Image (cartoon, rainbow, N blue to C red):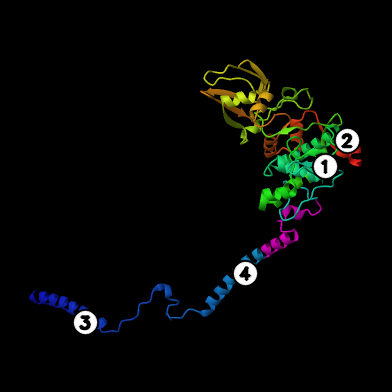
Amino acid sequence: MYNKKYKRKNTAIHKKMKQLKQKNRISNQPMQKIVPFSNRKSVHYKPQRPSPWKQIVITVFMVMIIFILAVPTVVVQMSKTENQISAGSETVDNKEEANPDEEDEPENPPEETASSDEAVEVGASPFNVSVMRVSNEEVENVPVEQYVAGVVSSEMPAEFELEALKAQAIAARTFTVNFLLNGEKNDSYDLTDSTQHQVYKSEQELQEQWGAEYHEKMNKINQAVKETEGQIITYNSAPITASFFSTSNGYTENSEDYWEGEVAYLRSVESPWDEASPEFTQQTTLTVAEVSEALEIPLQDDKAIPMEISHTDSGRVDEITVAGNAFTGPDFRDKLGLRSSDFTIEQSDSHLIFTTQGYGHGVGMSQYGANGMAAEGKNYEEIIHHYYTDVEISQVGEIAPTLVSN
């Protein structure tokens, strides 16, 4: 038994010794390089350098893709540029290119004003107008279309809409023709250049007034005159009294409420555009003594002045009684130099405060109203038919052949 136990112990030791010898044998061997499985191309791995041909192929492929994408874009841009040049620097619509046989007719072409670089001339004048220049008492013979341009330049701001300027040109031409046919005759001249008839300024006067803006403003006005060449307003085939004024109180006035006699085409109409006018409201303060002198009536400044006022349908003063003295609204306005016959009066101690609405007599066409209509897209014919009731637009040669022949 002793030998068996001893023999069993030797077996364990022998096994342990054998393991130590194997371990020592492995440690004495040189270490091999560990290569990742991803780089092993075969069972027996051989390290290889990346092929330069693959990089070249990838580069060429990328260049070809860029070339394919870029070339069509460049060609399209060059085509568009050629189309713009051939169309006079205007972009040609693709639909129009696809249908070259269709007529190029825009539905609503925008209204174009003349370039300030090119001088616009008024149309041909069938007769001349003899104008008395009040400042130097000299008479000038002016072609009628040129005269109309001088009146429009003086009576309406050049900044107004073109359609409003056209309406003003026709009104000025109509006033001129009507006065030459039916107005008071004078052996020396036809019209004055003042508010007695129509305010007129020559080109030289307008150059001094407008300075650097002369060419631009004159071109715009000449365009309005040229595009309405020879047109006048008629009623029953006769030129009308084409009265006009600056600003209404919201309504124009019936002719008989400001002047004597009813005129069928000078009816009161609404004119709401005038409220935007800078001339719509104004206050004027006068002393009682100044009012007494202007009205030529005795007034006391230490007592309240008794007044009674009646109005027309348009809201203007029809009649006013001051301290027992009666005046028509237009007469009272003229004597005190008020802007309108639509006024209210407030007494403050020895002063009277007048608040007016509108500027001018109020009969016929409102200039600021016409500009407001034009700003809303109305043309000159619509403006004229609004302010002058039941009228027509005719050619001067058809209405006044004798005047034209002279």
For badge 3, the amino acid type reads: Lys
Q: Nearer the viewer, mark 3 or mark 1?
A: 1
Tag 1 residue: 130
Identity of the residue drawn at 79% across and 35% down? 175
Task: Determine whether the residue tagged by mark 3 lies in a helix, strand or loop.
Answer: helix
Residue closer to the observer: 402 or 235: 402
For the residues labelled 3 and 1, say whether their Cβ atoms are less than 8 Å apart.
no
Of mark 3 and mark 1, the one earlier in the sequence is 3
Q: Nearer the viewer, mark 4 or mark 3?
A: 4
Tag 4 residue: 67
Tag 2 residue: 399
* Res 325 quadrant in image: top right
Q: Does 41 appear above or below 132?
A: below
For badge 2, the amino acid type reads: Ile
For badge 1, the amino acid type reads: Ser
Q: Nearer the viewer, mark 2 or mark 3?
A: 2
**Numbered label tally:** 4
Residue 133 appears left or right of 210: right
Q: Is residue 72 visible?
A: yes
Quadrant location, the N terminus: bottom left
